[in-house]
Image (tube, rainbow, N blue to C red):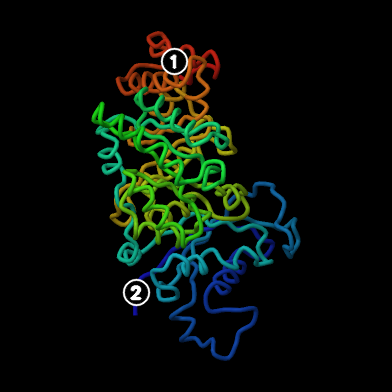
Amino acid sequence: MSTGFVIATYIIETSLPLRRAAEILAGEQSTGTFVRVARESDDVRARFAARIDSLHELPLTGASPLPGTVGDPTRRRRALLKLRFPLDNFGPSVPNLLAAVAGNLFEVKELAAVKLIDLDLPSEFAERYAGPQFGVEGTRRLMSRPSGVLLGTIIKPSIGLSPEEIAEVVAELAAAGIDFIKDDELQGNGRGAPLAERVKAVMPVLERHADRTGVKPMYAFNITDDIDRLEANHDLVVNAGGTCVMACVNLIGLAGLDYLRRRSSVPIHGHRAMFGAISRSEQLGIGFRAWQKLVRLCGADHLHTNGISNKFYETDDQVLDSIAAVREPLLGLTSTVPVLSSGQWAGLAHATLDAVGSTDLLVLAGGGIHGHPDGVAAGVASMRDAWDSAVRGEDALTALENSESLRRAAELFGPVRV
């Protein structure tokens, strides 16, 4: 019998006494039900019940209680709760772990809010799950970019271009010195540009560029599909010389990601599409810190974290915490590359580097490159100029003075962040 435990950290709200609500949650997710039953002996509870590890009251935020909540809302209280789950309840299995730490608990009516915000996992999980195969070092090697930030972009328009038009865009980007290109998450295997046709059109462009320069930009083809199609989609890319595949983690599931990892011979670019549905509410769902550990465990070499000054809902502090979380060691696994995206452009380089303190980042600029007033090549140049300047220790205003492409970008996107 294992002596290991998983510690799950939640933020909860309740109108019940805090400890009583925590006990209800612990019981519901382990040995208990709404009433003590005959075979729920003291021995069973001692061996298998989830236990309260710590409980600390927090200030209320003023948000409304979840639908169906019982109790007097004027007596609601908020707390940081850590529950200790015996590993023997589910074993080192991510799907079964989630049944315990993020299953029916979201439906418990005694809780006015419940959000899983972190997980501490025992080493048994790393013995079962391989984690990233390439990570930072392997990605740099395949891109021929041993140092500095990794600069990338997304094919834009997201959908609507023919395979031949996508290949033309790729040729421009490669000639401009881009490190990484990816399909948009909306570009899967549609009739307008099927995966097989995209691969057939794009890979010769990249191979010709590699023959000329010795450097082959990494292209992440979106192979997201039903699980029984993932391996064939991966093989289609790899057999054509591709060096990366992209999967939308929430759409194939964590078990699907692990399935792909066990069969993949190239880096897996992990997109977080649909993440907002499970995390945006402060009252319900799963926070990024908890979620990213499972994604990394299941094999994502790259993982989207969002970027500062983004077009979505997250604050800079939330984004920076996500980047820091992905960069933290996890059970001795290979490191995962944080992927910054959403509204990124050259004028954010200095502020990003100052806040993160590392260039082990993959920074994606979609509109920030494709929307540059002087075209795609100038968009790539603006990103490279800005990041090189930041790495040299110059300030953003100095970079602006020295780079025409950055100045032109600022005319469209606004002031650089200093």
Question: Residue 3, which numbered label?
Answer: 2
Q: CA distance from mark 1 to mark 2?
A: 57 Å
Q: Nearer the viewer, residue 195 or 230?
A: 195
The disc, 1 or 2, on the residue closer to the chain's N-terminal end is: 2
Closer to the camera: disc 1 or disc 2? 1
Q: Secondary structure at mark 2?
A: loop
Q: Percent x, y for residue 211?
A: 25, 31
Q: Residue at x 36, y 27 (%)?
A: 174
Amino acid at the residue labelled 2: Thr
In the picture shown, does residue 268 fall above or below 177? Answer: below
In the picture shown, does residue 89 fall above or below 307? Answer: below
Q: Nearer the viewer, residue 116 or 409?
A: 409
Q: Percent x, y for residue 143?
A: 29, 36
Q: Is residue 389 left or right of residue 410?
A: left
Q: Answer few, some or many: residues within 10 Å of disc 1's Cα (few below 14, many 20 plus, some between 14 and 19).
A: many
Amino acid at the residue labelled 1: Leu
Look at the image and tell me in which quarter the C terminus lies. top left
Q: Which residue is mark 1?
A: 406
Q: Residue at x 36, y 57 (%)?
A: 261
Q: Percent x, y for residue 220?
A: 41, 42
Q: Answer few, some or many: residues within 10 Å of disc 2's Cα (few below 14, many 20 plus, some between 14 and 19).
A: few
Q: Residue at x 49, y 33 (%)?
A: 155
- Residue 36: image quadrant is bottom right
Q: Secondary structure at mark 1?
A: helix
